[in-house]
Amino acid sequence: MSGFIALDGVSHRYGGIQAGPEGILAIQDLTLSVGRGEFAAVVGPSGCGKSTLMKLVTGLQFPFAGHVMVAGEEVRQPVKIAGMAFQAPTLLPWRTTLENLLLPLEIVRPHRGEIRRNRAAYVERAEKLLASVGLDGFGSKYPWQLSGGMQQRTSLCRALIHEPQLLMLDEPFGALDAFTREELWCVIRDLHAVRGITIILVTHDLREAVFLADRVFVMSARPGRILAERKIDLPRPRDLEVTFSTEFQDIVHELRGHIVKARQ
Amino acid sequence: MNSSPTLMIRLAPWLFTVALLLLWEFVCRAFNIPEFFLPTPMAVARATYEFWPAIYRNSWITLQTTLIGFGLAVGFGLFLGLAIGWSRTIYAGIYPLMIGFNAIPKVAVVPILVLWFGIGFMPAVLTAFLISFFPIVVNVATGLATIEPEMEDVLKALGASKLDIMRKVGIPRSLPYFFGSLKIAITLAFVGSVISESIASNYGIGNLMLQAQAQFQVPLIFAGLVALAVEGIVMYWVMALLEQRMTGWAQRSGFAQT
Ligand SMILES: Nc1ncnc2c1ncn2[C@@H]1O[C@H](COP(=O)(O)OP(=O)(O)O)[C@@H](O)[C@H]1O
Ligand SMILES: [Mg+2]
């Protein structure tokens, strides 16, 4: 099966191939495939090339060997069907929450041509999205008036406002406290269920990966490769309770074993 | 009790100024310092009153010269700052030149300007311009250079062009730096025009002070200094107000509020 996202024998070196051994070989001979509508999680030791993998898929970096295919096409420029969210919410402090949400629409075609004329409709869309992550009525607040969890929700909304087919999440909950993090797991879970969007989630939290994903990929230490791939068969919709089941904990344990090996 | 700290802060500048003047007056009298060495504030005030028309006219000229030079510096500084922030090549090419240029004391440039434009208005305007554009360039470029790479990635992955990123993130982001630099630039422009006036002009406060010195009217020299200080404070204050107006979002720290 050649999936919605397919990486085949991909190697990437920062500084370009001409950098040779001087450059940092971030990823080597990495192969992976994610189907349309699938929720994939990537786990691995810190610095193993997870963020690099995200950049390769979205066309922000290009490999010196191998192929990156998204939606059946080789990636040669930024892909434009993706939304991204990172550990830092990266909201613009001079814009309100609502204006931050509208930012992608000011850039992505065809919206950028229409947002002036149709502003009311777009504002309504943004407000609906805010409501769906529990941020009703916060549109007029500035980012610094929001808690860390609320900023991260806003950042998620910004990644989704233009209805991308692909959502790329790079350790989006890393900086949040445990309770907020679990709340946001449920937000993401529901977004995925409702929209059927393809999601790639990078995380170092194994419980997070197992709770959310259909499949978990374990990466080796740098240069990153896929060491193991684990299908998660826990039935959906998953409740937070599932994280206390033995089945869940067994999977986490098993992945943990891979990570321990990867770090050696 | 709630309003007393803010009242204190409002009064503080005046109290400190009055205290300084009193101290000055006291020292002059206590040690019997001769007027041609250090005149008392009272003597300076008297000189200001006596020569008010000349001081007023020349202050006005200095102000105009400074503002024109400053205006040029803002335009040119913005343009160059954006260019440097836009392209690494332009940055690499221009930055060393600018540092070298900035290191030249502008007093040394005045004679050349006089050679080109003659004595008077032009050299003063150009000195004000030359001395004040550097901080504007550096600050605008810094604002652009410190865009978070993640923010850039988010926008690029949406298909944003470099111009989009500049318009949506870069320029708004560098505005606080820009307005912050105006406070420094206006003060420098002022220094520039006065330097040039006192070397090569027949007008302006700089020239007035030079003539007062030639005639040994020491209180008038000090009256000129005070006029410069007042103008400097007013211009700085206007720039600070502008900064607050334009970039309130960047200033919400409660640091040093009392
Ligand atoms: N822009 C860059 N230039 C040079 N080296 C980089 C750059 N980004 C990441 N690297 C290096 O590539 C390796 C993988 O980085 P990254 O993909 O960010 O890892 P992870 O996200 O898994 O922590 C690291 O060793 C890092 O130092
Ligand atoms: Mg990373």
Image (cartoon, rainbow, N blue to C red):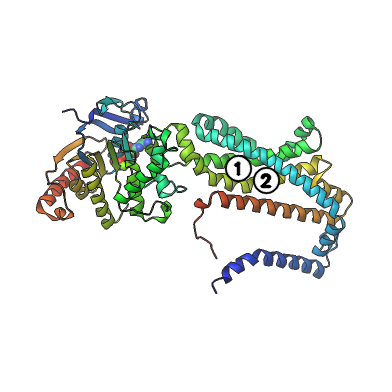
Q: Position of residue A163 (x, y in %)?
A: 31, 38
In the rendered image, the residue lying farthest to the left is A247
Q: Position of residue B208 (x, y in %)?
A: 83, 48
Pointers 1 and 2 in contact (CB under 8 A)?
yes
Tell me if A17 is positioned left or right of A42 in this view.
right
**Residue kind at label 1, given as amino acid type:** Pro
Label 1 or label 2, whichever comes before in sequence order: 1
Q: B188 or A222, which is in the foreground?
A: B188
Examine the image and state in which quarter residue B5 appears: bottom right
Tell me if A162 is positioned left or right of B147 in this view.
left
Are labels 1 and 2 on one chain? yes
Q: How many marks?
A: 2
Mark 2, ligand 1, within 8 Å: the answer is no
Q: Label 2 belongs to which residue?
A: B188
| Mark 2 surroundings: few (<14), some (14-19) or many (≥20) residues within 10 A | many
Does B155 sit above or below residue B216?
Answer: above
Does A63 sit above or below residue A246?
Answer: above
Chain letter for mark 2: B
Q: Residue at x 16, y 43 (%)?
A: A258
Mark 1, ligand 1, within 8 Å: the answer is no
Q: Label 1 belongs to which residue?
A: B135
Between marks 1 and 2, how big is the CA–CA gap? 9 Å
Q: Residue at x 65, y 54 (%)?
A: B237
Tell me if B7 is positioned left or right of A158 in this view.
right
